[in-house]
Image: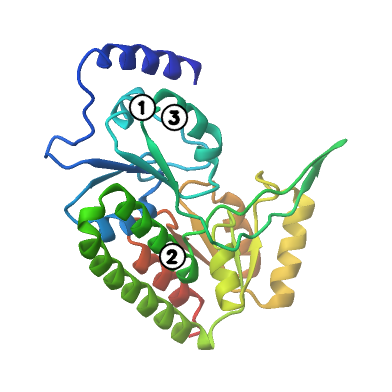
Amino acid sequence: MKQIIILFTALLCLSACGPKQQQSGEGQPTLTVTLEPLRYFTEAIAGDKFKVTSMVPKGSSPETYDPTPQQLVSLDKSTAYLRIGYIGFEQAWMDKLTTNAPHLKVFDTSKGIDPIREEGHSHGDHHHEGGIEPHIWNSARNASVIANNIYAALCELDNENTPYYKERLDSLQQVIAQTDAEVRELLQHADSTFLIYHPALSYFARDYGLKQISIEEGGKEPSPAHLRELIETCRRDNARVIFVQQEFDTRNAKLIADELGIKVIPINPLSYEWQEEMINVAKALKKP
């Protein structure tokens, strides 16, 4: 990480000799966001007025991702940064990013969302307090708030095009409302409990009155005792679905699935296709 910062600082010093450019090669000003679902929401409202880029690329984990030197240089050309709120990438990098690009305006799209507090966990002789569950975008209710925050940011950056952004915001809010309605319809006859390797669907579960059981324990691989406990909980609650994400090891999920004879369902909560992913989760939970 230190090498990345040193290289970025050197490149930034070279670029500072010329005029500051905050537009993309196509002539559009650039906005940077943290991850792909946020790019989806932002592009839906920004339309052709801004180019939108994600710091965490497809297939990478926003909990642990380190930006490339080229990304750090490109960030200096952005007009603003829209953060998702609490994800690991932002916790580790946000101060560095804003220090090295002081002109950058930062907007927090989680403003106004009711957060879920994670439980603390112990390691030997010390205890870690729980933070805020960061996967706020996996919720139609939260998506509506995020969209309003993006709209407010765009209006502040480009007030002349407020009517344009408002029209596109209204269209996105209709998509979000339709998604919510379809998910609720699918979940009318669905499992109320599901397993997931990494607990990315906490807000989805809260929205729809579901119980999410995480295989991951305190951000780490589960212990044998925890695995046995999970298997007994699944039997008791009649869970028949285990969701897995491509960023994580699926061996323990498959072990549980084999023990119980239940399905392992791959999902991608980090997908740009937000609506499709929300509906896919609901379809997987719907009883045959």
User: Which disc is residue 72 wearing?
Assistant: 1
- Specify which label sits upstream in the sequence, 1 or 2: 1
Secondary structure of the residue carrying tag 3 is: helix
Q: What residue type is labelled 2?
A: Ala
Q: Percent from the top left, x then y, of residue 44? A: 27, 60
Is residue 224 placed above or below 213 in the rendered structure?
above
User: Which disc is residue 129 wearing?
Assistant: none
Q: Quadrant of residue 40?
A: bottom left
Secondary structure of the residue carrying tag 2 is: helix
Question: Residue under circle 3?
Answer: 97
Question: Residue under circle 2?
Answer: 143
Q: What residue type is labelled 1?
A: Leu
Q: Is residue 155 left or right of residue 269?
A: left
- Specify which label sits upstream in the sequence, 3 or 2: 3
Q: Do the residues labelled 3 and 2 touch (CB within 8 Å)?
A: no
Q: Which amino acid does label 3 sit on?
A: Leu
